[in-house]
């Protein structure tokens, strides 16, 4: 077999050559821009040929780079086809995950390095989105959804039954009895407009004989990230899924209110077409995230 440069440097060249932008290539590969530059430099040294012309404004393929690119495109397409024939997985070394912004930012990203240390051969690419993924029209391998389940024509695995709780910052609660609904409901209110959370909030108001119509939110959206950020920065109290504020509670940035916790209408699910759960990279990620996630939330009830 004739000598070939390292496959990794060829892959980086392919992505960089197609995007003609090292920054965009780094984002696609989920690495730093410096890592892309290093791999391209290694390939150029290996081939003894300059593949890119770099200026302050743009990155362009050289004549040799333009000649090499279509061979790399065809070569990697053939590799993907061959691997898919054997495993069903066209990209066994790349795991593409779609998940909601809030879970991605608040829980997954801070812990993802642990998975990558266990499995450095797998490159994880995240696609945060509040929209449901059409697996047939995307290259996503696995979705982590926070919802009610019932994802049509897909296999779903419930990994955590969440709870809804009330939270606020300690600073906002100065002089307030955090377990007294009358006092808490005098604070500014941060409203999550997700249907399930609204239904639960209104039911709680009815149970304590509080007129829901009297409340005027200081901010309202169905995106948990800005809502939680507002609560941390003393702007109001919030009903929220406990999984999303676990680290804020442990760090003392938020405090649980009203001795209240009820099963959330929204649970965490792993979702994908059935065959994709048999792929090695998906199995490895599932085996890592499920116990990690459950352990992460196991002590929340001890924080009052």
Image (tube, helix red, strand yellow):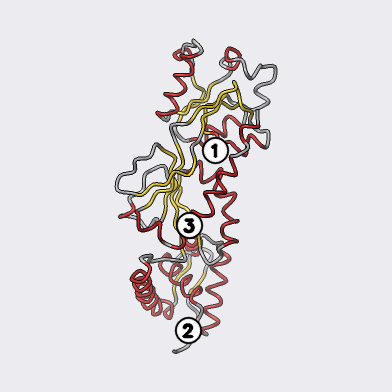
Residue 298, percent from left and from top: 60, 39
In the displayed orientation, state which residue is furthest to the bottom: 2
Residue at mark 1 = 243
Proximity of marks 3 and 2: CB atoms separated by less than 8 Å: no
What residue is disc 3 on? Answer: 125
Residue 54: where, in percent of width, then height? 51, 70
What is the quadrant of residue 257 in the picture?
A: top right
Q: Nearer the viewer, mark 1 or mark 2?
A: 1
Q: Are marks 1 and 2 in contact (CB under 8 Å)?
A: no
Mark sitting earlier along the chain (3/2):
2
Choose top left, top right, bottom left or bottom right for residue 68: bottom left
Number of residues whose C-alpha sits closer than 10 Å to that of mark 2, classed few (under 14), some (14–19) or many (20 or more): few
Indicate left or right for 177 with 154 as reference: right
Q: Secondary structure at mark 3?
A: strand
Residue linked to disc 2 = 4
Q: Is residue 128 above or below residue 195?
A: below
Of tags 3 and 1, which is closer to the observer? 1
Above or below, 163 against 280 in this view is: above
From the viewer's perspective, is 17 left or right of 105? left
Total marks drawn? 3
Q: Label 3 to label 2, Cα distance in Å?
A: 27 Å
Q: CA distance from mark 1 to mark 2?
A: 47 Å
Determine whether 237 is above or below 87 in the image. above
The picture quadrant where one finds residue 139 is bottom left
What residue appears at the point 47 percent right and 61 percent down from the top-left corner?
A: 281
Residue in the picture at 61% in, 35% down: 300
Circles 3 and 1: CB atoms closer than 8 Å: no
Q: Is residue 117 left or right of residue 212?
A: right
x, y percentage for residue 263?
49, 30
Q: Nearer the viewer, residue 45 or 301?
A: 301
**In the rendered view of the protein, which quadrant contains the C terminus?**
top right
Residue 195: x percent and y percent?
Answer: 40, 28
């Amino acid at each position: 077999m004739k000598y070939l440069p390292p496959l990794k440097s060829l892959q980086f060249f392919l992505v960089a050559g197609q995007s003609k932008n090292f920054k965009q290539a780094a984002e696609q590969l989920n690495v730093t821009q410096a890592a892309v530059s290093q791999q391209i430099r290694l390939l150029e040294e290996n081939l003894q040929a300059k593949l890119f012309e770099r200026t302050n404004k743009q990155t362009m393929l050289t004549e040799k780079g333009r000649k090499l690119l279509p061979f790399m495109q065809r070569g990697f397409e053939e590799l993907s086809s061959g691997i898919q024939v054997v495993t069903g997985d066209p990209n066994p070394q790349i795991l593409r995950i779609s998940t909601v912004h809030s879970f991605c930012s608040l829980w997954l990203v801070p812990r993802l390095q642990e998975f990558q240390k266990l499995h450095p051969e797998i490159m994880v690419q995240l696609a945060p989105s509040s929209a449901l993924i059409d697996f047939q029209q995307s290259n996503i391998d696995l979705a982590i959804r926070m919802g009610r389940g019932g994802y049509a024509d897909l296999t779903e695995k419930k990994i955590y039954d969440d709870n809804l709780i009330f939270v606020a910052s300690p600073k906002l609660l100065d002089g307030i009895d955090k377990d007294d609904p009358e006092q808490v409901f005098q604070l500014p209110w941060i409203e999550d407009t997700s249907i399930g959370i609204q239904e639960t909030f209104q039911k709680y108001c009815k149970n304590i004989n509080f007129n829901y119509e009297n409340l005027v939110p200081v901010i309202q959206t169905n995106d948990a990230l800005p809502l939680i950020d507002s609560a941390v920065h003393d702007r109001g109290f919030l009903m929220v899924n406990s999984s999303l504020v676990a680290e804020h509670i442990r760090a003392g940035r938020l405090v649980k209110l009203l001795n209240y916790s009820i099963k959330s209408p929204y649970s965490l699910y792993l979702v994908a077409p059935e065959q994709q759960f048999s792929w090695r990279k998906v199995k490895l990620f599932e085996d890592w995230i499920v116990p990690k996630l459950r352990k992460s939330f196991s002590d929340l009830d001890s924080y009052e």
